[in-house]
Image: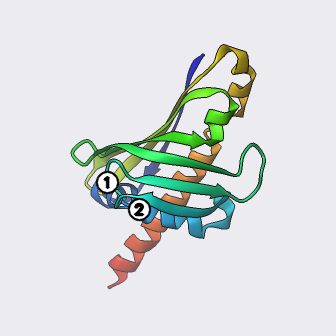
Amino acid sequence: MFGQLSHELEVNVPASEAWELYSMLRLAKLVEEEPASGIEKVDVIEGDGGAGTILKLTFAGPPLFTVYKEKFTKLDNEKRLKETKVIEGGYLELGFTLYLIRFKVIEKDNDSCIIESTIEYDVKEEAVANASYVTIDALANIAELSKNYLTKNKAAKDEH
């Protein structure tokens, strides 16, 4: 069974600034530093933040799983698009054959953009009940965390 969930959040910073955060490993560090994210630790297993980078995410509590590895499968600076796929553990152990996260930064005007977060998943028929575990909440929280970080940094720049 295939499914998709999406979330959009408007941010009052230029798309280039939001993309700078999302396109690099800074986003992973920002999430790791925020206890409310539910992610306790992010380890870079391989790569420098570009396509092919592999991260190991350790979660704060064991609601479903405590760790999984994800790989950056696409990083398109022109389209401001980043895709990551779970490649080991996590949802794959719950019967999912695909768990993909897509971040896209869409320019609205010179001073604002939209952060679009999408989850695409495919789950085996015998594990279809586990599809109910998929929620967009974590990505919505990451977008909100990013918005706060970006607007705080913009305010600091504007003061100088």
Query: Would you name the residue on which mark 1 appears?
Result: 50
Q: Quadrant of residue 104?
A: top left
44 on left or right of 127: left
SS type, badge 2? loop
Q: How is the image coloured?
A: rainbow
Q: Is residue 129 above or below residue 156?
A: above
Question: Is the residue under label 1 in contact with that under label 2 (CB below 8 Å)?
Answer: no
Give the camera-side residue of 139 and 125. Answer: 125
Q: CA distance from mark 2 to mark 1?
A: 9 Å
Where residue 96 sits: x, y (%)? Answer: 61, 28
Q: Identify the amino acid type marked 2.
A: Leu
Q: Identify the amino acid type marked 1.
A: Gly
Camera sees residue 107: yes
Q: Residue at x 69, y 32 (%)?
A: 94
Kindly identify which numbered label has been placed on residue 10: none
Q: Is residue 112 above or below residue 116?
A: below
Give the camera-side residue of 19 and 102. Answer: 102
Where residue 59 sits: x, y (%)? Answer: 67, 56
Q: Residue at x 64, y 57 (%)?
A: 58
SS type, badge 1? loop
Q: Residues within 10 Å of mark 2 (few under 14, many from 20)?
A: some
Query: Would you name the residue on which mark 2 appears?
Result: 25
Q: Quadrant of the C terminus?
A: bottom left
Q: Is residue 13 above or below residue 9?
A: below
Q: Residue at x 72, y 27 (%)?
A: 130
